[in-house]
Amino acid sequence: MPDLERPYRLAARDGQAEPTVVTIGQLRIGEGCPVVVMAGPCTVESRDQTLTTAQWIKAQGATVLRGGAYKPSTSPYGFQGLGAEGLEILAEARAVTGLPIITEVMDPRSVELVCRYADILQIGTRSMQNYDLLREVGKTKTPVCLKRGMSATLTEWLQAAEYILLGGNPNVILCERGIRTFETYTRNTLDLAAVPALRELTHLPIIVDPSQGTGRASLVAALSKGAVAVGADGLLIEVHPDPKNALKDALQQVTPEEFAALMHGLRPIADAINRGVA
Ligand code: PEP
Ligand code: MN
């Protein structure tokens, strides 16, 4: 008999006493660990753009490089990413900087390929309910960053995580990235209440993406601080050497200088809650 009162089990806090800590080399992501900052361009556009950004964010204290090679695009005319060539560029950036990489996988048929490059697989908001994709990444042991569907409730999101856990992959990180509301000034409404709410509901690590969450570069630093203050285990931040000319998400990517200031403002918050930045 299906137990409709318990829509997820493996993800539930009451099913596992210890918090899940996802490890990538020396890096630990989860409750009680130092705050992990993942940063980099929305999209891998070129070798130069990615390597420059990777070196900059590393110098400022980020510990994971982000960048999309396969990009979900609302418009079919929008840039779709460099694909396999983008993965090669990310691998080179990792070799140069030593930073692990997080990158999106959209197609169940690409999971094997993307796993050869990614230290963390990103499942985007538009794919949160692609159950075939969730099952496929569940067969791997590669950490998965599962973004919240833009219209998903916390229960639906945790049920999506359950698909991955049920497949045998325990390394799931949840990422709040904003939800659709009536407000249009911000691209999405970043639901910071989700962070302490999820802490009650699940043992999984929780990170926040203030870039997709606000859609405005000017708001990213404040929401990064807010996210850490409410207990996020990490941040996913878009940084571009020349945001105005970015091929995607031009309005929300911060410049390298803005990222440096953001990191400076973040440290006292992370220290105040006795976590520090990884
Ligand atoms: C992104 O991180 O660039 C992205 C496309 O995220 P989301 O799936 O949250 O829109
Ligand atoms: Mn983006």
Image (spheres, grey):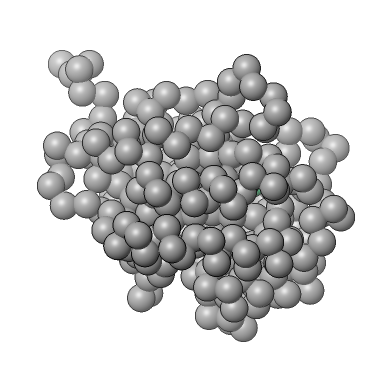
Q: Nearer the viewer, residue 213 or 144?
A: 213
Asked if residue 58 lies left or right of residue 162, the reply is right
Could you tell me residue 255's position as x and y percent?
A: 73, 61
Circle count: 0
Say whether residue 243 is left or right of residue 104. right
State the residue at coordinates (57%, 30%).
Answer: 189
- Looking at this view, is 56 or 203 the one in front? 56
- Give the vertical position of 119 relative to 152 (above or below): below
Where is 159 relative to 262, above or below? above
Q: Quadrant of residue 90?
A: bottom right
Quarter of the picture holding the C terminus = bottom left
Tell me which residue sits at (59%, 78%) in the image: 59
State the residue lying farthest toward the bottom.
96
In the displayed structure, would residue 76 be above or below residue 23? above
**Placement of the N terminus among the 4 image quadrants:** top left
Dividing the picture into quarters, in which one does residue 114 lie?
bottom right
